[in-house]
Image: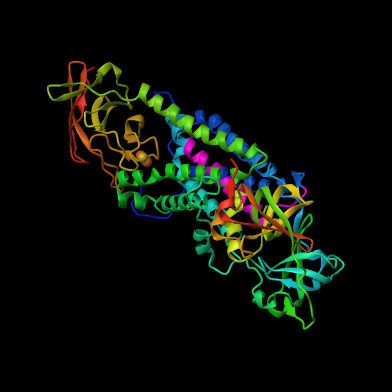
Amino acid sequence: MSVKYIPVQWNPNKWKYNTIMLVSVFAYLWIFIELTPGIMANEGRINGQIHNARAFGSCAFFMLTVILCIGPLARLDNRFLPLLYNRRHFGVMTAFVALTHAGYILNWYFAFSSSSKYETLLFANTSFSQVAGFPFEIFGIFALLCLFALATTSHDFWLKFLTPRVWKRIHYLIYAAYISVVAHVSFGVLQDQQNHIFTITFMISALIVAVLHLMAALHERRHGDQMANLSDGWVEVCDISEMKEGFANIAMLANGERVAVYLQEGKLSAISNACAHQNGPLGEGKVIRCLVTCPWHGFQYNVTDGRSPAPFTEKVPTYNIRLEGDVVKVDPQANPPGTYVEPVPVKA
Amino acid sequence: MKENAPFFVGYLKIPAKLHGFLIKVSVIIFASFVAGAFLAGASQDDPGKAGFRFDFGRQKLKGVLEANPYPLLHVISGSDRIDAGQTIMLTAQGKSGIMTDTNALNGRVVEATGVIVRRGDLDMLQVLPGQRGIKPTNEASILPASEPLGRWRLQGEICDGKCLAGAMQPGRGLAHKACANLCLLGDIPPVFVSSKPVEGEEFLMVGGADGGMLPRELYHFVGQFVEIEANVERRGDLLVVLVEAENVKVIK
Ligand code: FES
C-alpha cells in the first residue's frame, strides 16, 4: 500500500526472497554453462552460443514452472503464502532470463545473413502447415511478449491505473505464456533429442503445474465458500458461535461477490472479501493492531469503514450487518467503498 | 484462517512458526535448480566432431570451378590437407554462398583461398570475400564430365551443408531448421545425409532435377527425415543427387 509510487518498496523479506531466488538462478546458469561441458563425454563441442541459449532458455522454463506452482500451493496450504508475496520480482527476473535466451538465438541462428536478424526470424522458416518443422520460434516470441507485458505492468502503479480486475485479467496471460513455452520446446528442441533426460524433466515439470492446479481447483470445490441463504432480503452468514475474535467468516452472495464478516473487540462488521490491491481474500486475513490485514501482501483496512489507515487511500465496500438471535446476517446490497457502518455488538 | 496458524505479513517479521517451513522450501527450490541444471545441461546430445579447421591454416587451392547446382572445385593442385583430384564444395562467410558470378566462371581454373569446414569426409571451403577468395586464372581447362549413377531411392535428411560440416554445432535437425533454411536462401550448398551409404558416401550434394539449385518448395522438407527418389551423379569424387519436388516425402 503506497501513498506515492517508488520503483520498489523494499523490506527485509523481499531482500531474503530475491536473494534465495537469485542464488538459485545463478547456480542453475553457472552449473549449466560452466560445469556441465566438463561432465559430458561428448566427442564434439556444442557452440558456446547454443549452449548458453539452452542454459537461459531451460532456466526460464523452470522459473516459469516455479512461478505457476506458487499460486495453487498457496491455495492448498497457506504456509506457502510468503512465496506469493514477492512473486512478481521473480516474474521480472524470468522475463530477463528469457530475453537473454532470445538474444543468443537471434544473434546466432538468425544472424550472419544479408538480411536483418529480426526479419530473418520471421521469414526463414514458413512451414506453418506442418507439425514436424513448424516454425516453433513463433511460440517463443509470443511467450516473451507476454512475459514483458506482465513485467512492465507488474508495478502497483499499473495495478491502480488499470484497476485490479483488468490487471488480474491481463496477468492471466502467464498461462498463455506457459502453454506457449511448452509448445515452443515441444516443437523445437524436443524434436531432435536423442537423450531423453531433458524431455522427461520437462514433462514432469509441466505435469506438476497441471496437477497442482487441478488439486487446487478440487480443494476450492470441496472447501470453497458456500452460497449463503437468503431470508427476508438478508443473507445468513453463520451462527454467532462460529465467529472468533480477530478473524472472519466468509459468505458468498448470489452475485458471486464474497463478504467477510469480522468479529473485532466483541463487535461484528462486514466488508468486501476482495482486497483493493489484487483482490486477495480479506476474509482469510486477520486483525492486526485493530486493522484487517490481507494475507497476500498485507494491505490493511479499518473493518468499520473499509478504509486503509492514513496516509493510504485504498477503500473496499462495506455491508450492513445485523444479528438475529444467534444468526449473523448481512445486507447483500454493498455500500459504496469506504462507507462507515456502525459495528453490531455481540451480547455476552 | 485458523486462529493459531502462523500469519505472514510481508513487511513484518516472519512468524517463528514459519521459519522451519520456509527454510525447507528455500532449500528445495535451490536444490531443484541445481538438479535441473545438471539434468538439462549434461544430457545434451553429442553434435559429433566437426567444425572450422582454423588450425589447418589458410588453404590455397587451384582447380576447375563447376557452378551448378552449387559451386564446387575440382582440385588440380591442393594443399597438405586437400589433395589434388578431390572435389570440394565452396561457400562464403556467414550465411552466403560465394558471391562471385559463378556461371561466368563455370569450367574455368580458379585459385580458391579460405578455411576448411569439416565433418568426417564432408569438406567445404569457406573462401575469403571477393577476388581474395576466388581468383580466376587464364589457364586452359576442361570441366570433368559427370558420371550418371542411375536412379536411387534414398532415406535421410536435407541439411545446409555448411552448418552440417560444423559451422554450427549442432548444425542439423528440426530445431535448427530456420537456420538451415536461411543458409539455403543464401545459396549455401545443401547436403543430403543418407541413412545408408550411396556408393560408399554418406554425404551428397543436393540440387534440383534441372541441374540448378534446390527448388524452394523443398525447403519445407529441410531437417525432416525424408525419402527421395532421384538421379545420382558423380562429379569428381563428390556425389550429387538431383531431386524433383514431387519425389520427396516425409517418413513418419
Ligand atoms: S491482494 Fe495484495 S494486499 Fe491484498
Q: Nearer the viewer, residue B33 or B59?
A: B59
Q: Is residue B133 left or right of residue B40?
A: right
Quadrant of image for the N terminus of chain B: top left
Between residue A164 and residue B245, name the one nearer to us.
Answer: B245
SS majority, magenta:
helix
Question: Residue B50, percent across and down?
Answer: 75, 55
State yes or no: residue A64 in magenta: yes
| Residue at x 40%, y 55% (from the top left corner) | A6
Residue A266: x %, y % from top left:
26, 24
- Residue at 63% x, 39% y: name it: A198
Q: Residue at x 28, y 37 (%)?
A: A302
Can you see residue B70? yes
In this rendering, position of residue A304 left or right of residue A8: left
Q: Quadrant of the C terminus of chain B?
A: top right
| Residue interval drawn in magenta | A43-69
B4 and A259: which is toward the camera: A259
**x and y, in percent, of residue B235 in the image:** 75, 63
> Where's residue A239, x and y in %?
25, 17
Please identify the quarter of the rendering in which residue B162 is found: bottom right
Question: Residue, x 85% and y 66% (percent of image)?
Answer: B83
